[in-house]
Amino acid sequence: MINIRPVPNLRNKFSEIEEEITTTNSPIILTNSEYETMSIGLSSSLIDSVERRLDEADKYADECKVRHSNDDIFKRVRKRINGKSKILRREQEETMTLPE
């Protein structure tokens, strides 16, 4: 998780920040405004979610013996996208047609 602190902490709690950086080996982001803190915090939660999913995928790939080529993967994705677009078009046509 990303650690975010206000800039005055650098002056007031320098030794604490230094210790935290060296013990956790992770960065601390210092910001001036609440807006920056909120946007960075939101980005952090999105990034954490993506990283968690990628870790799950890596673990699954390590355990799974089946391997797929890029062509196979993209064919499957295109097929799903085209299938969904056909369904969406059909739904749009149905909503546009008025019952008699």
Image (cartoon, rainbow, N blue to C red):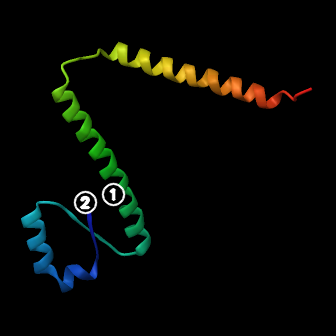
* Residue 17 in the image: above or below residue 13: above
Is 64 on the left-hand or right-hand side of 99? left
**x 52%, y 23%: residue:** 81
As drawn, the label of residue 44 is: 1
**SS at badge 2:** loop
Circle 2 residue:
1
Is 1 on the left-hand or right-hand side of 81? left
The quadrant in which residue 30 appears is: bottom left
Within 10 Å of disc 1 (Cα), the crowding (few <14, some 14-19, many 20+) is some
**x 42%, y 63%: residue:** 39
The quadrant in which residue 18 appears is: bottom left
Q: Quadrant of the N terminus?
A: bottom left
Q: Identify which amino acid the numbered label 1 is placed on.
A: Ser
**Which is nearer the eye, 51 or 17?**
51
Q: Identify which amino acid the numbered label 2 is placed on.
A: Met
* Residue 31 in the image: above or below residue 25: below
- Place of residue 46 in the rendered image (x, y in percent of width and height, measured from the top left): 37, 52
**x 70%, y 23%: residue:** 90
Q: Quadrant of the C terminus?
A: top right
- Place of residue 84 in the rendered image (x, y in percent of width and height, measured from the top left): 57, 25
**SS at badge 1:** helix
Q: CA distance from mark 2 to mark 1?
A: 7 Å
> In the current view of this chain or complex, which residue is farthest to the right?
100
The quadrant in which residue 40 appears is: bottom left
**Label 2 close to label 1 by CB (< 8 Å):** yes
Mark 2 vs 1, N-terminal side: 2
- Place of residue 12 in the rendered image (x, y in percent of width and height, measured from the top left): 19, 86
